[in-house]
Amino acid sequence: MPTAIFSIGRSGLTASRASLELTAQNIANAGNANYSRRTLTQGELVLTGSIGINAADSLGGVRPGIIERSESSLVQRQARDASSALAAAETEFFALREAESAIETSGVFTGLVDFEAALTRLEGNPLEPALRLSAVESARTLAGNFGIANGALANTRSLVQGEASADVLSVNELAAELAAVNRDLVGAREGTAGRAALLDSRDRALRDLAQQFGILPTINANGTADVALAGSPPTALVTGGVAQSVSLSFAADGTLSFAVGGASFAPSGGAFAGRAAALEQLADLQTELDGLAATTISLANGAQASGVGSDGTPGQPLFGGSSAGDIAVVLASANGLATAPAGSPAGSRDTGNLASLLAALGGPTGPSAGVDALLLGLSSRVSALDTRRDGLGVVASSAESELLRQTGVDLDTEAANLVRLQQAFEANGRVIQVAVELFDTILGLG
Amino acid sequence: MPFVNSSAGTFFDRSLAQMANLREGIERARTQIATGNRIERGSDDPAAAAQLRAVTRREALSSVEGDNAARLGQDLLSATDELEAVGTLLQRARELAVQAANTPTGPQGREAIGFELRQLAEELFSRSNASGLTGEPLFAGLSSGTAFTRDAAGNVTYTGTAASGAVPVAPGTAIERGLPGNEVFQFDLNGTPSSGFAVLDTLAAILTGGGPNPEAAALAAIAGIDAALDTANRSQTILGTRLAWVEQVQSQQADRDIALAERRSRVGDTDIAEAIARLQQSLTALEASQAAFARVSELNLFRALG
């Protein structure tokens, strides 16, 4: 029957046009990182009917099937885990590198060396007013540098905290979005373009969440994703259509703690784990810096107390305060620098007391050695984090390209498909033309 | 899918990342060349940065110690100059005492000698209170006041301290600032403490005051002047030795500064030749990969079909 040829040709035309549309969609989304390439399945259409014992098959052409979205949950998971680990290392690295710059460029070490140098110069001629004044001024510079280091460290801390406060909002939004996608997915019909788009949004939300927290997602049979945050204890964030909210709190020393839906929780991956680790290290740095300032204060004031100034009066404290934030020179006059040991008369050129202060400042437990050790420790840590970040970066980018390889759009393939489908479309058109000619032939018999 | 799919996104991502890496390397090499510093921040090379800090501290202290040594050298030089003048002065006093001890020198001659001796005693007193270039007394030990004072009766007493303190001129080396006046101008004469001032003043008083036996007194004073000369000469030797020590320390310091500068350069300076070679290499690689990127990105089926 020529009508069968018509309908076969028409079904072919429909199927190839639908495939062409999908190919065009793939090409259009080649630059969309969240897009997973789609293919259209096709099925043969055969109509079987029987009357009595005469069974007859009638060919029906092709039936466009469902839109298949290329998926690879394993590679997805690898990519997510790698990006979690990378984000953790990266945020910690950037925070600590800023702290390193803060302490290195604040000039605490240079200030200590200059102070030592000024005191050594004073040893050469302890009564010269200019040298005494320059020693006191270098002490003032040192105190100022401690203040700068303290301020820069506080600044680093508040930057990290600000970033955390901003990002926790986006985490909560992502969780809510994922819950909404889950609700929509339940109602979406299998094999439709709408469902594929929802799955794309689901994977995008999971990937963005993984940047911020290590996640333990469970993909259910209906395509919905339940997400728990990795950490101690692992805590559910999104269950079906319900999302918990994450909240942050900062302790007095700047360290970060988390709560999910009111229950406290410590993350083990993602940018937030990196931030929490960085803030803890920043708190340690602050303690160390304060300790160094306190050592400097107590050494200088202790030396002052055990000596006399150029006028023979007992030395008064050189520094006031007790930490890097409030260290300041309180000695009123440069004459009050206790260069001579206690009991020396006015105008003594004895530098015994100054020498013992210098020995204490430059000694292995003095603040110079302390700042050096602090900087060495910090820069070693930053350097190690940099190496780790590089390594994780390679892992993450290879996981990412593996994911793209599995789900991304290959323009060459699509171009080949275009040609193939175009030819299929033309061929189907030709089939209809043949059917028309057949019909005309039959009509012309009369 | 069974066939190998190389996503267009992967190609672009990878190419961009590689080119960004190259550009970062170029930027770094350029900064190293421009600043001359191999280490931009401590974490570039923590151990080298720690060494650089140690070198910086040593350099700062070394320059101050160098200044201290130079100043100490000047003080010691001033002190030896004074002592040389003191030696000449005592030599002249001795000649005068010998003359006075000679009988042919009459009472008037002795009186004239007495006047000259009094002047010499004055000069000796002022030289003992001389100060260095910085205005600090040379022979007062740790005290900043005058070294010797003369009371109403004309007796000279030492008011400085017995120690003169040391100045650090190199790591672990401190050199005594000078000699306290009591070691330079005071001595034991036949078991009794005496001084150049006492010897000269006593003789001058006897010669000008017309004492009973001026020849004998002059003869007796020669021993005192000899002792004063001995003490002054000994002090001059000590100061000369210290001066030589300071000079030696200074030359060592110069050597050490060079060593420090070499170390700083080795640890922290950019090896310009190497950096330029590296820069050139990275530039070539970047150009090549940009060209390759342009070529490869044109290789798609669309272009072939079009």
Image (cartoon, coloured by chain):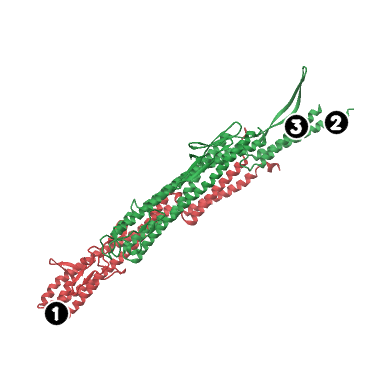
Which is nearer the eye, A110 or B188?
A: A110
Q: Residue at x 73, y 30 (%)?
A: A62
Image mark 2: chain: A
First-in-chain label (3 vs 2): 3
**Tags 2 and 1 both on a single chain:** no
Chain B representation colour: red
Mark 3 sits on what residue? A11
Q: Locate the N terminus of chain B and report the quarter of the image it occupies.
A: top right
User: The disc numbered 1 marks a residue on which chain?
Assistant: B
> Which residue carries the number 2 mark?
A440
**Mark pair 3, 2: CA separation:** 22 Å
Task: Check disc 3 and report its element: helix, strand or loop.
Answer: helix
Residue at 81%, 33% (x, y): give it. Answer: A433
Instruction: Give, as a three-letter code, the residue at label 3.
Output: Ser
Chain A tint as drawn: green
Are discs 3 and 1 less than 8 Å apart at CB? Answer: no
Label disc, if present, on residue B209 of the rendered structure: 1
